[in-house]
Amino acid sequence: MKGTRSTTIALAVALAAASGVASAADGDAAAAKEKRSMCIGCHGIPGYRTTFPAVYHVPKLGGQHAGYIVRALQAYKSGERSHPTMQGIAEGLSEQDMADLAAYYAAGGE
Ligand code: HEC
């Protein structure tokens, strides 16, 4: 019984990996659905402007290239691109989080 169970798990993992091939980079757009809860407060609202620490126009992410989004997040994390809010957010993202979010937004997510 134990053997059957681990075979099933291995198969499920293989299928999940295979289905991920279709999305951009190695990101998994479906996995981003939960991660983006920390982005929608700003990026999910068309024409939204943050008021901290000054008034900033928030760029729309949906439809941007996955590679561009990942690069932008890495640049905020490294401090190469500086913006206090996005830097704080990018610091908490792993490479996988960035790839997943980029795949989601590149596919047209809001
Ligand atoms: C508190 C508001 C806020 C939140 C929350 C937020 N962002 Fe941002 N984001 C901004 C602002 C403002 C900018 C523009 C900063 C600049 O001018 O560099 C920005 C810029 C970006 C950019 C660069 C876009 C471009 O066109 O160059 C990316 C990519 C990005 N955010 C991704 C995310 C992701 C992914 C999340 C969630 C993990 C997130 N942001 C959460 C406010 C926010």
Image: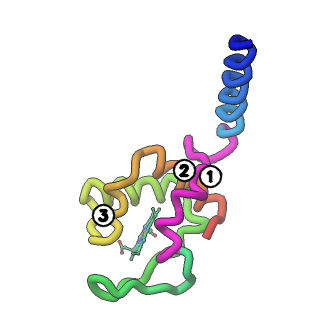
SS label for mark 2 = helix
Q: Is residue 54 above or below residue 71?
A: below
Image quadrant of residue 15?
top right
Q: State the CA–CA distance, disc 3 to disc 1.
A: 22 Å
Question: Mark on residue 100?
Answer: 2
Q: Which residue is mark 3?
A: 87
* Magenta-tinted stretch: 21-43
- Which image quadrant shows ligand 1? bottom left
Query: Callout 2: 10 Å neighbours few (<14), some, many (20+)?
Result: many
Q: Main secondary structure of the magenta part?
A: helix
- The colour scheme applied to this rendered structure is rainbow
Q: Is residue 61 above or below residue 72?
A: below
Task: State the image coordinates of residue 57 (x, y, percent, origin top left).
Answer: 42, 83
Pointers 3 and 2 in contact (CB under 8 A)?
A: no
Is residue 34 a member of the stretch shown in magenta? yes
Circle 1 residue: 29
Does the magenta run of residues contain 52?
Answer: no
Residue located at (39% from left, 52% from top)? 93
Whole-Å distance between the Cαs marked 3 and 2?
A: 18 Å
User: Circle 3 — which element?
Assistant: helix
1 or 2: tag closer to the N-terminus: 1
What's the mark number on residue 107? none
Q: Mark 1, residues whose alpha carbon is within 10 Å: few (<14), some, or many (≥20)?
A: many
Do the CB atoms of the residues marked 1 and 2 lie less than 8 Å apart? Answer: yes
**Residue at the extreme front of the image, as rendered:** 1
